[in-house]
Image (cartoon, coloured by chain):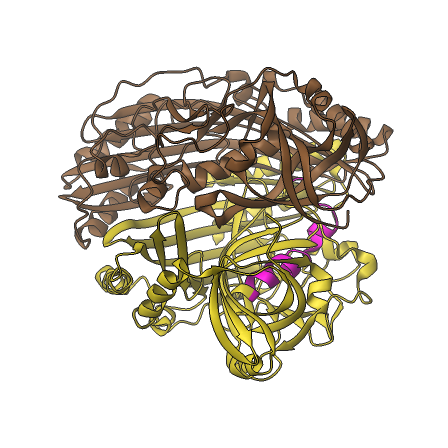
Chain colours: A yellow, B brown
Amino acid sequence: MEDLREVIHSLKRKGVQYADVRLIRRMHQGLSVKNGEIERSLSVEEQGFGVRVIADGAWGFAANSRLTKAELKKTSDQALRIAKVSAGAGGGRVVLAEVEPAIATYRTPIQKDPFQVPLGTKLTLLFRATEILQKDPRVKVAEGSLSFFKTWKSFVSTEGAEIEQEITESGGGISATAVNGGEAQTRSYPSSHGGDFATKGYEFIEAMDLVGNAERVREEAVALLSAEDCPSGETTIILDGPQLALQVHESCGHAIELDRVLGMEMSYAGGSFLNLEKRGNFRYGSPLVNITADAAVEGGLGTFGFDDEGVPAQRTEIVKDGIFIDYLKSRETAAVLGERSNGCMRADGWNRIPLIRMVNVNLEPREGTLEQLIADTDDGLLISTNKSWSIDQMRLNFQFGCELAREITHGKLGRIFKNPIYTGITPRFWGSCDAICGTSEWHIWGVPNCGKGEPPQTARVGHGTAPARFRGVQVGVKR
Amino acid sequence: MIGEAKALETLEKVLKASEADQTSALLLGSTRGVTRFAESMIHQSMAESNTEVLLTAVLGKKIGSASTNSFRVGDLKKTLQRAVDMAKVQKENPSFLSLPGKQEIAKPLTFFPETAKVSPKERAKAVKTLFHKASICKVKLAGLFATGEGEVAVVNSLGVRAYQPYTFAEVKVIALSADSSGFAYSLSRDTQKIDPEVLGERAIKKCLESKNPRDLPPGRYDVILEPPAVGELLEWLSYIGLGAKSLQEGTSFMTGRLGEKVTGEQVTIYDDGLDPEGIAIPFDFEGVAKRRVVLIEQGVAKGVVYGSLTAAKEGRESTGHGLPPGTGGGPLSLNLFMEAGNVPPDELPSRMERGILVTRLHYVNGFLDTRRTLMTGMTRDGVFYVQEGKIAFPVKNLRFTERVLEAFSRIQAISTERQAIGAAWSELGATVVPALLIRDFNFTGETMF
């Protein structure tokens, strides 16, 4: 901390408008077992620091992995030079919204430190689960994976903030791919693309019961091989929790990032249809739809103590009774609106500029169970687990492919269908939502691979969802 | 940059201390600067310097890997111990035969000193010139100008000793008006081959031409896909099916079809890590020399790329496309090429009675049905309706959902010129592609801009 203070004092003496320095050390353990063999067995440790400077109204950022006093000085000088150069090219208008400088510490509450659990225990779990997946010869790919992260962050700013955080993240899942002739079908648990993740310890993995769910996953993968293609047409759909999490992620989470709205991400990820004129009056969804951004909820993958510019974790109402009311903000973008940041700036490590990232963007629960919702549905489809995702750069036209659909007829589940695809336009889709299950079905799903920025950054974010029903949705495409 | 002598000597020193039966070290170092702009001003400009070392320990057939971004010998030795500790608790991997042995490796020209020296000031000056032009045309610019240098080294206990320094430069410009946008892009190992002003003018021209876009209903249209659009489709083809792992696991469109016609006769796709038209790099992350691999030749499935683990499973040699050992990925074709055709790019619209010209694609996803190469995605940054061989008017963006290899069997013309399109791994590879004219491309949805 003392070295970081010195850097900040030195930049202050040079008359910068603002500066902060983040020193980060990160440990990661990645394990995967595929078809009875260890496919991935990796231990990563990295450290470094990044210095952000505002001088003459422009940002400069420099990062270095060599943790010496000389490199700290050299790198902070470099950040200052970059800021001045950018200001000279017309980049000098940055103002930051006020924040109370915090002197604080935060530590993810965990029961079992995943880095203290023996490797053998983790591998045994993966072997046991994947052995069950392999019991049908049609399953050609039986895979299980576990991932753990521990990140230590120290943050010091010219405004007097001094924050230390220790964040622990755990996740994992299993999947079975059954192959027959020209067909390949995959089922995953508890979610696809690596499973489910949370800011929790190894207790989160134990509670998943990967072994107990392996047989069902295997049977569903095999059953999909002989299932009919999902019929096309406009129909009622119920999305399960994991798929709804990705629906929230793509059509709400990214759309409410204020940097996108202000055009700052047009060169890569794009903008947003939720422009400033729509705030407070635009009907984003039906009156049932309430969406919040909550970085303070315990255990969510987007949960922390402070964001990467020292703003405390907080809860923000984003969509209230279907009306769009607020954005995910940084100090810079909040100042454009004359407001305060709601703490959404995070960087993918020491060598990346913090960007506005989702925290836990949650669809708030309403009432009832999935069983009751199905019983209440005359005709439609229950669509489960994401397979593919695509949305335009303003976050309007989306298309999702999922692993499995179940027919619903007169309130009962029927046949399974393979290759379900559904598509829509964001506000029309959310406007068609006429039921959301209650708290007993609600879970915060961890999405560990959210991409944004150049150079690319990966964020780990969360989405609380309970299954929900949507009317008149286009399922399938013309082929 | 650590440099060849110090990098190799240090890694060899660490390997000598290894208690493992076989040990390898992969070093990836880079110093880069990225100047990002939006709303015609620089909003993010950064410099970064990092060196990562991945150490892999093999005990019999047990493999463990560990990485660090410290280059101190003491830290490297501790990291090696972590790799050994990881390996000790593994089950044996029956598919593993050995780390690769000593290789003859080519030394292509991949380092251009002038590119390594480009400063934030020079990048800022270049983009400021673009802002001025944009302001005259009443459009705003977004994009980036990135430059940097890097180094890759692989050393292993069986005699592999490979080192390659490189530079890279990438410029992307998106011009935006209230209802239109235009795009231009260039990637090279040599910054002197990129002219940001020309790119800026191209993006601005396209933006102005795409103002007042009209609605066009979804349906099947003949389409011209410009190189950035083709590059994205090829990148996905590579990811879902041109590597040995997906072939062996049965999820590739090549599974069971090697030697068969899988797409149109005009289509030849290959990987070549040494071709300077792409972003050359002469060896893979295991230190195996990259071989030229023909993947699809005149529409016939010819082969896939291999790393040492997938090659061992079939009793063959690696083609030099392995990803870092122990990390679970790949193999992957990082230097894809599609063979050019015989129509100058400007003449492609004249080969079309009516249809759509697409500048590039957005958010393509190829996981819908990998066996049938079913993909979806949106158009972006300049879509035009072509009538009687000429661009008639701009149209709003559309979604496509298409079996890509089937679509490639309907190719009507291929451009003479190709362009290198970068991906997330643009420092170590690129996809070099022509523009394509395809009949009856399936547009399945529309959006509101």
Q: Is residue A186 left or right of residue B288?
A: right
Range shown magenta: A244-267
Rendered position, B386 above or below B63: above
**Who is closer to the viewer here, A9 or A415?**
A415
Which quadrant is the N terminus of chain B positioned in?
top left
Rendered position, A64 above or below A444: above
Q: Is residue B433 left or right of residue B242?
A: right
Q: Report x, y in % for residue B153.
A: 34, 28
Is A245 inside the magenta-drawn segment? yes
**Who is closer to the viewer here, B338 or A415?**
A415
Q: Is residue A92 left or right of residue A257?
A: right
Task: Give the residue drawn at x 46%, y 18%.
Answer: B111
Q: Report x, y in % for residue A195.
A: 42, 61
Q: Is residue B58 left or right of residue B305?
A: left
Task: Give the residue drawn at x 52%, y 21%.
Answer: B189
Q: Report x, y in % for residue B240.
A: 44, 42
Q: Is residue B260 shown to the viewer in this render?
A: yes
Q: Report x, y in % for residue B334.
A: 43, 31
Which quarter of the figure has residue B260? top left
Q: Is residue A96 shown to the viewer in this render?
A: no
**Who is closer to the viewer here, A326 or B404?**
B404
Which quarter of the figure has residue B65? top left
Task: Give the residue drawn at x 29%, y 62%.
Answer: A133
Rendered position, A453 above or below B337: below
Is A18 inside the magenta-drawn segment? no
